[in-house]
Amino acid sequence: MITFLEGIIEDKKPTHLVLNVGGVGYEVVIPLSSYDRLPGVGEKARVLTHDHIREDDHQLFGFMTDDERRVFTLLLGVSGIGPKTALSALSGMTVRELKVAIKDADIKRLSSISGIGKKTAERMVVELRDKFSAGEMMSAQVAGQPETESDIKLRDAVLALISLGYKRGDAQEMVARVINLSSMAKADVEGIVRKALAG
């Protein structure tokens, strides 16, 4: 099993990177949370990995922190959640937000993740709630103030732009410009993204 890779970043996108390890190029699938922490192309990086092997498929999933990899592995243990959905969960929410949503049994928040319906969200709560220590949960809850609906909407708009290839800083600026327009006060995520792309 491959536990980590260390090499030079040849290419990186919000969904994957190519790491040159001693002349061998490894394609590693990553969540947005890890993409934000990666150094630039041509720089050295150490990526923690999860080696996912099936009869018809072999993929490497990469993470910049132990916490991300641990939560990814725990999510894979939930019935109905595969690698793609687990990665989507880590791209749509931070590890802290996932832990808080699981602890609070926030089914609505969890089922807003692409690929996760109400029943799967309920299974996540039942199966994962006891996997995190009381200390972990407390740290997750005090790490940040509760998000308002508006905060979530703006963050999701930024993530959508990042998934389209924009850098986080540029995406945040684009969204900030849009939300200053009075006409966008009640716009949904799709409306904000469309307006941001239109300039």
Image (cartoon, helix red, strand yellow):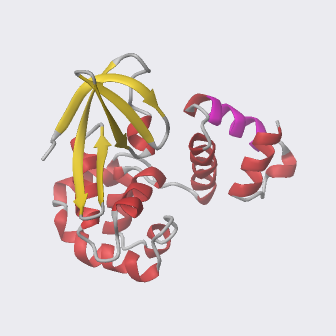
Residue 99 showing in the rendered view: yes
User: Percent position (x, y) of residue 118?
Assistant: 46, 80
Image mark count:
0
User: Percent position (x, y) of residue 97?
Assistant: 39, 55
Residue at image point 57% right, 44% down: 163
Q: Is residue 109 above or below residue 91?
A: below
Residue 89 lies in quadrant: bottom left
Q: Quadrant of the C terminus?
A: top right
193 horizontally vs 75: left or right = right
Q: Main secondary structure of the magenta part?
A: helix
Residue 180 showing in the rendered view: no
**Which of the pair 12/106 is nearer the observer?**
12
Q: Is residue 84 above or below residue 29?
A: below
User: Percent position (x, y) of residue 186?
Assistant: 78, 58
User: Percent position (x, y) of residue 187?
Assistant: 77, 57
Asked if residue 44 lies in the magenta stretch, the reply is no
Q: Residue furthest right?
A: 183
Residue at image point 19% right, 61% down: 132
Q: Is residue 119 above or below residue 4?
A: below
Asked if residue 175 lies in the magenta stretch, the reply is yes
Residue at image point 38% right, 65% down: 101
**Which of the pair 143/119 is nearer the observer?**
119
The stretch in magenta equals 170-179
Q: Is residue 95 above or below residue 45?
A: below
Q: Residue furthest top?
A: 42
Q: Residue furthest left?
A: 1
Residue 80 lies in quadrant: bottom left
177 horizontally vs 97: left or right = right
Q: Residue furthest bottom?
A: 119
